Image (cartoon, coloured by chain):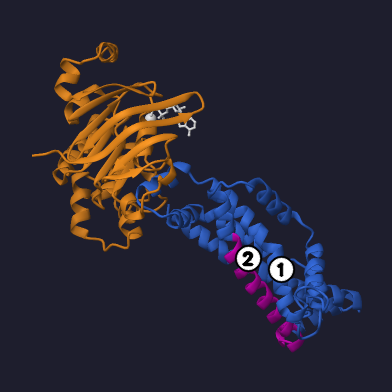
Chain colours: A blue, B orange
Amino acid sequence: MSLLASLQEAIYLLVTRDPYVMDIIMVSLNVTGVALILSTLVGVPLGAFLGLTDFPGKPIVTALLYTGMGFPPVVIGLFTFLLLSSVGPLGHLGWLFSVKAMIMAQTIIAFPLVAGFTMAAVMAVDQNLIQQLKALGATRAQAAWAAIKEARIGVLVSIIAGFGGIISEVGAVMLVGGNIEGKTRVLTTAIVLETRKGNFGVAIVFGIILLAITFLANLAMLQLQERDLFAR
Amino acid sequence: MEKMITYQIKGLVKEYPGFTLKIDDLTLYRGEIFCLLGPSGAGKTTLLRILNFLEEPTAGEVYYGGVKYTKENFNPPLEIMREITTVFQRPALLKESVWNNIIYPLKIRGQKVDREEVMAIVEELSIAQLLHRPCTTLSGGEAQRVALARALVFKPRVILLDEPTANLDPNNIRIIEDMMTKYMEKKPTVVWITHNHFQAKRVGDRICLLEEGRVVEINDKENFFTNPSQKRTREFLAGEMFY
Ligand SMILES: Nc1ncnc2c1ncn2[C@@H]1O[C@H](COP(=O)(O)OP(=O)(O)O)[C@@H](O)[C@H]1O
Ligand SMILES: [Mg+2]
């Protein structure tokens, strides 16, 4: 198949909203969305806690977190696979080769990114301010929430980083999801498969869609940040 | 009328590497402004932080509202913490509007904002024109006035002021002093750190000189400045009056 024909096919698939393509987009959005929400719900409070609290063993927890931020995702995929395999400790859940397994792996991959960047952002908040808030009657939780709001731009960047980690993931979701058509096939794994089969047109379509989703999502998140910058 | 006791400090020790604050006996009363004088590094801020229960002592007792607090239980219940406030030397404001900063203490207490009450403080401090401004755009004097407004809206019983007018121009200083004078009608306990003897003379009821973590002298205003009991106080006043 020539490159020109591939492009033609790409346009055709997009215009006709091919069900195979639509399915893959929906699974991608589902996995990415849920995993990002979970990573944020875990990562932001964890990062804020680490950024604001001193406790014995904090350096070890921090080192573990930083390791998590740079850990090869495919290894996390392997780890999740073993957890969920029929002989693994979570095998009884029956999640392997399902969207749930992919969300689980993606969350484990992304939450250290969210927590790590949130921690750095919250640590940069003026210590004086946190003292001042306590002196105004804030509880620990209220002071922590105020610190997160103070560090909002950095926290947003942490969520963008988490999103980047999730949307670009291939190896781990391939392992635990199994790349099953109509069920666990997402844009990245579909690109691998279609390229291997020589269906460059379809692969290009997926590439373009992936790019568009990433761009639009970042644009939306930047919009939030922009509004905040203007508000100063 | 009998003076009502707010704080009693007994054998207080706070140790930092290379520094020890030691206050054997100190009583603070309701309705007074207690001025803390002393050179930089004397331990004034440290004492304030202990009075606000932000820092626990190494040893000794702090009685507040008749309850004894030691390092074992140096975290009073929230409703007690919420009677006490500090205005720090460097105003620490949230990156939000002036208005949101001022009502922050009410919001965290889940209290309704009584606009009229808040505006009375706002007018007194001449910050009405700033209410919608982001706090990042304020001058030093404006920021400190906002910080004071925020500290007063919830009607604290104890106000700890850490050099609130340091580096401010005379107009800002006057506004802040007038505000505090007015707030004294509510009979709070005020501890006011200052480097300015004239300010201590203007606003203080009792003056305390702290040096190297020790109380040199506590006296009422008249005696402190005209007839101090300690030779060291006289030297301090003479030396500093020079500037
Ligand atoms: N958190 C701290 N850790 C170590 N030393 C401190 C700390 N806070 C204050 N100090 C030391 O205690 C001494 C008194 O400080 P401070 O109470 O701030 O003095 P002042 O307010 O009178 O200028 C100083 O020598 C200061 O370096
Ligand atoms: Mg000080």
Disc 1/disc 2 C-alpha distance (Å): 8 Å
The residue located at (19%, 20%) in the rendering is B224
Assign the N terminus of chain A to one quadrant of the image: bottom right
Sequence-earlier tag: 1 or 2: 2
First to last magenta residue range: A14-43
Q: Position of residue B162 (x, y in %)?
A: 33, 34
- Asked if marks 1 and 2 touch (Cβ < 8 Å), the reply is yes
Between B82 and A127, the residue placed more toward the observer is B82
Q: Is residue A163 left or right of residue B71?
A: right
Query: For the residue carrying disc 1, how many other residues have a C-alpha within 10 Å: few (<14), some (14-19), or many (20+)?
Result: many
Q: Is residue B204 above or below residue A57?
A: above
Is residue B159 shown left or right of residue A75?
left
The chain holding disc 2 is A
Q: Secondary structure at mark 2?
A: helix
Residue type at tag 1: Gln
* Residue A126 position in % (x across, y down): 48, 43
Residue B109 shows up from this direction: yes
Residue B60 highlighted magenta (yes or no): no
| Chain ID, mark 1 | A
Which quadrant does ligand 2 occupy?
top left
Q: Residue under label 1, please give it.
A: A106
At 74% from the left edge and 72% from the top edge, which residue is drawn?
A: A208
Q: Is residue A135 above or below residue A99?
A: above
Task: Check residue A39 in the rendering and tell me which mark sits there, or answer none.
Answer: 2
Q: Main secondary structure of the magenta part?
A: helix
Q: Is residue A48 left or right of residue A189?
A: left
- Mark 2, other Cα within 10 Å: few <14 / some 14–19 / many ≥20: many
